[in-house]
Amino acid sequence: MESFDLSVIWALIIGFGVIMYVLMDGFDLGLGILYPFAPNEEARDVMMNSVAPVWDGNETWLVLGGAGLLGAFPLVYSVYLPALYIGVFLMLAGLIFRGIAFEFRFKSRRNRVWWNRAFCWGSAVAAFAQGAVVGAYIEGFPVEDFVFVGGALDWLTPFAVLTGISLMTGYALLGATWLILKSEGEVQRWAYRITPTLLLAVLSAFAMISFWTPLVDPAVFQRWFNHIHLIWVLPTLALACAAWLLMAVYRRQEGQPFIATLGLFIFTYLGLVASKWPVIVPPNYTIWDAASAPESQLFLLIGVLFVIPIVLAYTAWTYWVFRGKVRPGDGYH
Amino acid sequence: MELDPLLLSRLQFAFVVSFHAIFPVFTIGLASYIAVLNGLFYKTENPAWDRLALFWTRVFAVVFGMGVVSGIVMSFQFGTNWSNFSYATANFMGPMLSYEVVTAFFLEAAFLGVLLFGRGKVPQGVHLFASIMVALGTFISSFWILSANSWMQTPAGAELIDGRFHITDWAAAIFNPSFPWRFSHKVMASFVTGGFVVAGVSAWYLLIGRDVEANRRALSMCLWLLLVLTPAQAVIGDFHGLNTLEHQPTKVAAMEGNWETQSNVPLLAAWPDQAAQENLFEIGIPSLASLILTHHADGVVPGISEAPVDEQPPVWLVFWSFRVMVGLGFLMIGVALVGLWLRRGGRVYRHRGFLQTLRVMSVTPFVAVLAGWFVTETGRAPWLVYGVMTHAEGVTPSLTGGMALFTLTGYMAVYAVVFACGLYYLTRVVRQGMLPESGDDSGEAHHAKRPFSAANARFDDDAAPTWRQ
């Protein structure tokens, strides 16, 4: 009974960490993806400045999630990482390059164009790899006796490519609406202009995934179509958020487009969780199969419950300090 | 040639961990030094201490940033390349590694920002407190990592059930037999590293005649410190060796190149030949190894051949890494002693040969640390968890040689670019020196709270250089 509770608590913590990461690193990765399309170099300054003070705090959640998985659900750690071996490397390399671009782009003049490229490509590759993880999760992993037995590029299926590209567009949408919130003038007008197109791309991608997923995984089909279920509320709310976003952009609202996009992401994420729960290493293993020993989960829980409120408070404080519009010429570097 | 995923995984881990290790080894020592400088300024109000603290905090910021970047890769290595090991040991390794992350984030969230950006904005006492907490935090971080590593060397407090370790006694597992000595040895290594780097940079400033007053103080302080710390490190290392003799006799036998169990073992230079199970040539000082290891001239030292051939470490690597470490250790003690002798008449601040030597010596602690790390890590081969799980059992079963080669070359390429940039930038920070911050710092409240932002040297010189001699 005790182990049951702990595994659920840990699933909630990890689930919370994942969505925090997706939302927060999502918009700064998205800005990297939009980088080559920016109208001019001044706009790029504004884009990078709008996330420079917060991006590394955003990536806190990725590291916390990685270590937390080893502590709480070691089966996830020891199946996903070997299965996604190449993808994990690409994601880390991408994150490192874009991270270092934040530091050096403003400090250099002659070499700036290289840091622009590092920022864009690093963000794009990392976003694609993360999206492909979602695809691989939906499709499941060949596991025998708690050990991954597939090949190096098994994860790179057409479906995973679709989810990879979808997450890239999704992050770009988050980035664009974040920019509406944080910029003004020409940059903001550009962000308003691209948002509906990005939304359209995101919605078509999500629609394709939604129709494809039940074909990939019959269990998901069962859950969604066998009886009318409360979970249909989730995609409905996601669509409502999309409509809200469109309205807000049409009315030139500044804060609402970003919040609506966050809503779109949250409800889509909850829909995915609802499709799979409590399976965490598809197709066969649940959170209880994947759990570490209860005493280990408990030992770690104490520290994590202590530190998460502090990290949240610090994050909130940082966003508060750097609230308001970013103007060309402001330096956060 | 067949690519061996096991060998490539070991090389990859050695590469990323070696690259990562040099940053924390330095920052742990430096954080304490900065805390001391801030403490001295708080007490004496002498601006020289403040200038030194400000300068070294900027260096700390850049090195800390690089340590964090390279550390992210580490937290995924266990799963990608050593999934069987991760799964089997997760009940212990998971909480240990997570607690390290938790400590680091707590530190960053709560105190690092105050240390890096709070100068002049928070009361001086609060700033001092933050720098002490950052120093303390670096110790706590290394506490968890070294406990995890020591547990792999001397597993305790755990029970193997169905191929997975379950912790039966947390205190015994965390404070396992080799942990206290390994931790002391590593912390002391960090202090020595910090001491030699600060001494080397101060010596360079004295050579070019910049900021002489502050750098004389820094150099003098470092040399006093090193005079105490370098011999202390030798003593701790000796105890660490005795502890290893008790728990991992084969490792010590490899360190000494001693193939057969015997008494009156000489200390020697030799070329160990693993295939022949003997040394190709040896020059020895009679009984010295016995004396060092057992503190008796006729003490019995275990031989490598006590272990079956397939359970022996690569002897030449352990043997020579050990000699590099010890040799550099004695060199460091020697330099500290020369520094003491040159103090007469203040020659220590003027003797160009000595100052040049100190510049070069700032690299030696890093080499010594890596050599020591090779001794302890390759010396336990083939064991991943000593006596229980081998490298071959711990490696990811689905991993192929091609995959491992792809990521090994990939990480080498990424690290080459990133850390070349980082080190290049660090040299610019050092060259910029202790000048007051340039105009950039005016937008006080709107300063990014990231480590690198604490340094504001430029990356390239398209514009006029921001420093002048």
Image (cartoon, coloured by chain):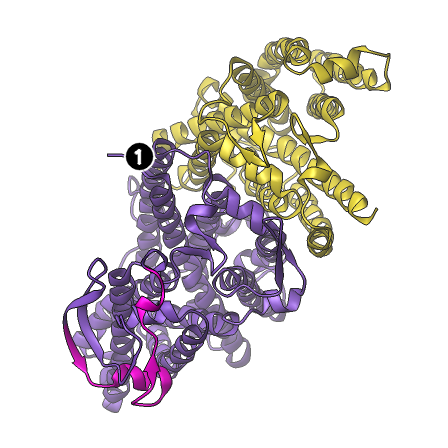
Numbered label tally: 1
Q: Is residue B432 left or right of residue B266?
A: right
Q: Which chain carries label 1?
A: A
Residue B412's spot in the image, x, y percent? 32, 41
Q: Bin the neighbour count of mark 1 within 10 Å (Cα to Cα): few under 14, some 14-19, many 20 and up.
A: few
A315 vs A183, nearest the viewer: A315
User: Does B139 lie within the magenta span?
Assistant: no
Q: Is residue B326 left or right of residue A181?
A: left
Q: Tell me if I can see residue A203 in this picture.
A: yes
B256 vs A193, nearest the viewer: B256
Pointer 1: what residue? A110
Q: Give the range drawn in magenta.
A: B282-308
Residue B395's spot in the image, x, y percent? 45, 43
Residue B29's spot in the image, x, y percent? 44, 68
B293 vs B145, nearest the viewer: B293
User: Does B301 lie within the magenta span?
Assistant: yes
Residue B284's spot in the image, x, y percent? 17, 79
Residue positioned 75% across, 12% down in the render: A243
Figure check: B85 above or below A222: below
- What kind of element bears circle 1? loop
Q: In this view, does B35 lie to the left or right of B464?
A: right
Figure check: A170 above or below B271: above
Figure check: A43 above or below B239: above
What is the quadrant of residue B288 in the picture?
bottom left
For the colour purple, the matching chain is B
For the colour yellow, the matching chain is A
What is the quadrant of residue B434 in the picture?
bottom left
Q: Tell me if I can see residue B202 in this picture.
A: no
Residue positioned 73% across, 54% down in the render: A298
Q: What residue type is labelled 1?
A: Arg
